[in-house]
Image (cartoon, rainbow, N blue to C red):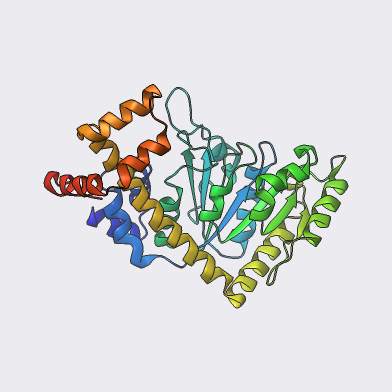
Amino acid sequence: MMKLVEQMLAGDVLSLSRLITKVERGSAESLDIIKLIYPHLGKAYCIGITGPPGAGKSTIVDRLTAIMRQQGFTVGIIAADPTSPFTGGAVLGDRIRMQQHYLDKGVFIRSMATRGSQGGLPRTTSNVVKLLSAFGKDFILVETVGVGQTELDIMQNADTTVVVLVPESGDTIQTMKAGLLEAADIFLVNKADRPGADNLVTALEMIQLYRKQNHWQPPVLATEAINNVGIRELYRQIEKHLKASEKSGLLYQRRKEQRRTEFIEVIKHRVVGDLLRLIKQDKELSRYMAMVETGEVDPYSASDKVLQPRTLLTSWSQQLGEKGLTY
């Protein structure tokens, strides 16, 4: 594994692909991979592109990548695709739409299956972002699958979040309630040549008047990505947001919060995994589980019984140590 990581850090694309596959599949080596590459993180700037299905996110990523390459930057693209019902893998539609970059050595494209994730991104996305960062990419573009208006996982991965809407996206107030508007650093009204685009731009601008920001007021841009209209302005606003975030300390604070959240999630994931294994082994816990399942006791009362005495928690801890289970 060490050799594979060393080859990846030296610029070997095949090694990068193999490491991503291991991380994406959640192999036993995943944790060691991330530990080895962690000292090499920090250079890449991650941009999230999110919004409802059919908003043109893939085209925007394609056009934005072209501009970044013209500026001499290297780009990594993570495109979350729906899971194939036949293979369990990604549908790979984004690679088809980004053919102009497929043979460009300065661009690495990876399609990832959501594998049942409800937040618009696979759970392993953050670790794939780390691999691309360690590989040396200047920019990493993360495109969500477009499952609807709940794709807030992107906030845990991106330094700049671009929310893409189209005139037929629906009630912008509903979008705001769902949280996408709060997540946005930049708004794009794509397919702006369609009827209703001007009204949507005006509505978003009105909403922004009531959203007080100390260091950055999210701009509302109109684009026609298919015709390459407005993409350079998008790139300019991304640059402005990067500089504003660095100057205000917001970038440092955001990454600090992301690391904190990741730390908690890693602990939670491991504890839950070991707890589920212990449920099958601990008679007392199994008894409470059976009572909850039959409706004899509600989950809250059962959890009080389990957690309040602390004796059961002590017992679990001892069992974990005896059986060599590790978090």
User: Which residue, as the protein is rendered here, is positioned at the far bottom?
Assistant: 247
Front residue of 318/88: it is: 318
Q: Is residue 26 visible?
A: no
- Residue at 62 percent across and 56 percent down: it is 161
Nearer the observer, 304 or 87: 304
- Relative to residue 211, is residue 123 depicted above or below? above
Could you tell whether 63 is left or right of 122 in the image?
right
Number of numbered callouts drawn: 0
The answer to whether residue 304 shows anywhere in this view is yes
Q: How far from the left and from the top, in percent, is residue 178?
A: 66, 44
Nearest to the observer: residue 216 or residue 66: 216
Please provide percent x and percent y for residue 209: 81, 61
Horizontally, residue 206 falls left or right of residue 115, namely: right
Q: Position of residue 254 (x, y in %)?
A: 53, 65
Q: Residue at x 62, y 61 (%)?
A: 70
Query: Residue 182 occupies which quadrant of the picture?
Result: bottom right
Compared across the picture, whether 65 is left or right of 39 comes to: right
Percent x, y of residue 115: 45, 34
Identify the residue shown where x is 32% and y is 40%.
305
